[in-house]
Image: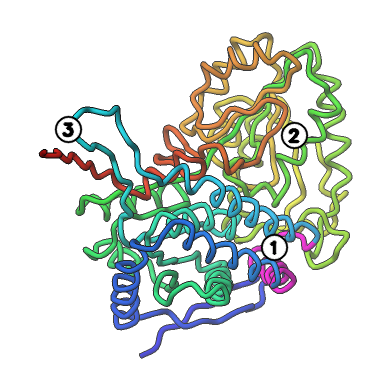
Amino acid sequence: MEQTFKVISPIDSSIYYEGKLHNSSDIETTLKLAEKAQLEWRETSISKRKSYISKFVDAFKNNEKRICEELTWQMGRPIKYSPGEVRGTIERTLGMLDLAESSLTDIFVEEKEGFNRYIKREPLGIVFVVPAWNYPYLIAVNSIVPALLAGNAVILRHSAQTPLVAERFYEAFKQSGLPEGLFQYLHLTHEDTSKVIMDSRINFVAFTGSVKGGYEIQKVAANRFIGVGLELGGKDPAYVMPDADLNYAVENLVDGSFFNSGQSCCGIERIYVHESVYDKFVSGFIDLTKTYKLGNPLDPDTTLGPVAKRSGAELVRQHIKQAEDAGARAMIDESLFPNAKTGTNYLAPQVLLDVNHKMNVMYDETFGPVVGIMKVKNDDEALKLMNDSPYGLTASIWTENQDEAIKIGNQVNTGTWFMNRCDYLDPYLSWVGVKDSGRGCSLSKVGYEQLTRPKSYHLKIKH
């Protein structure tokens, strides 16, 4: 019997899409096709691989309108911001294209008379990509494009919240002329996802999602000797120093806290502000937060859409209530946002003061439009609080003193350290987490390393 799944749109709780789940026969066909295609692809030159990816960029860009509308319906991001995901996907693709030659060419070691010695970067085989729904194109492209450029075949199993993303990727690659079987997708149950990971033809798994999901993926993959990349979210802090440009810091940290309704693994969830500028910063932060317009994300004037999942909305409400019960002050009157209603996916942005690390909202990942702000006396206190977290994806500092920023950054346990910016991925820099934010690396030259294996050639020349 055919199994189906439904996408419930956070906009109005309607069924936006109903699709067919792939079965065991579909999985077998997909794996066979990928394995066959990869054998020829691995022998294809890097320049030829790049030409297909360049054509993919053109095809993807030409479908922008449809991609943006579907994105908004599936996960609720305001339509005015959806084009940013298209631009970001293209930016990262172009970055990985630019880095491909230097990242994948052979490594020649010091010359030795009578020998030819070098290290070749070989593709792994088939890469299984399992991304999250919150930035569904951006997260997926981090692994898909470099995996293909490295000579691998890719099978994408996207989130059940954003399944059409997989189909749009597939269409763009098909239009690019990419050989059949090199990029495929499967709509799968969790059980069948595990079966794919266990298949001997899968050589690497790139997963983005919750810590719980990461542990489950790792548990399944532990039965095999394959690599697993895990990007599992964060509780990203910001520290505002006395010399910070406050207007600039307020503008960017408000955006970093509430863009995408706070549903970003590298979004700002907690802010520490030096006591000398605390009052002024908080005042500006609250005033700017009040200017958001919460509503239907298809309205071009909406700047804050619904949270993608009802369960996510309820978790945010729980964190706010728990903090308030413990003495925190909620500074945003929800009556300013009449569309925020209990029992829906629509949440008003919230700013909490008088918070501490005994509150869930300052320690556990909330993943919604709420941020806690704490006053600190000095750098040491800020540093201690920033590191007091089970996560370590990104952290940011707001200052005009680069030397101090680097000094403090050297002591923060995080994969990325920002100065005067946040919530951004640079394709030329590695994307990596520590602690419960995961392991492995995507993007940058370093990101290619987990998608290839080194093979040494030690050739003795006899005369």
Residue sitting farthest toward the left = 462
Tag 3 or tag 2, which sits nearer the N-term? 3
Does residue 122 appear to the left or right of 447 in the view shown? left
Residue that numbered label 1 is attached to: 76
Residue sitting farthest toward the front = 463
Residue 342: give x, y in percent of width and height: 71, 58
> From the viewer's perspective, is residue 388 above or below residue 330?
above
Where residue 182 sits, quadrant-wise, is: bottom left
Q: CA distance from mark 2 to mark 3?
A: 60 Å
> From the viewer's perspective, is residue 119 above or below residue 40?
above
Residue that numbered label 2 is attached to: 253
Residue name at image x 11 percent, y 38 percent: 463
Residue name at image x 39 percent, y 63 percent: 44
Residue 213: give x, y in percent of width and height: 40, 52
Q: Look at the image and say whether residue 38 sits in the magenta stretch.
A: no
Q: Please tell me how crowded label 2 is: few (under 14), some (14-19), or many (20+) other residues with Cα within 10 Å.
A: many
Q: Front-most of 234 and 147?
A: 147
Numbered disc in front, either 2 or 3 = 3
Q: Amino acid at mark 2?
A: Leu
Residue 1: give x, y in percent of width and height: 35, 90
Where residue 358 sits, quadrant-wise, is: top right
Secondary element under disc 3, as helix, strand or loop, is loop
Residue that numbered label 3 is attached to: 114
Tag of residue 213? none
Q: Amino acid at mark 3?
A: Gly
Q: Front-most of 86 and 195?
A: 86
Tag 1 or tag 2, which sits nearer the N-term? 1
Residue bounds of the magenta highlight: 63-79
Majority SS type along the magenta span: helix
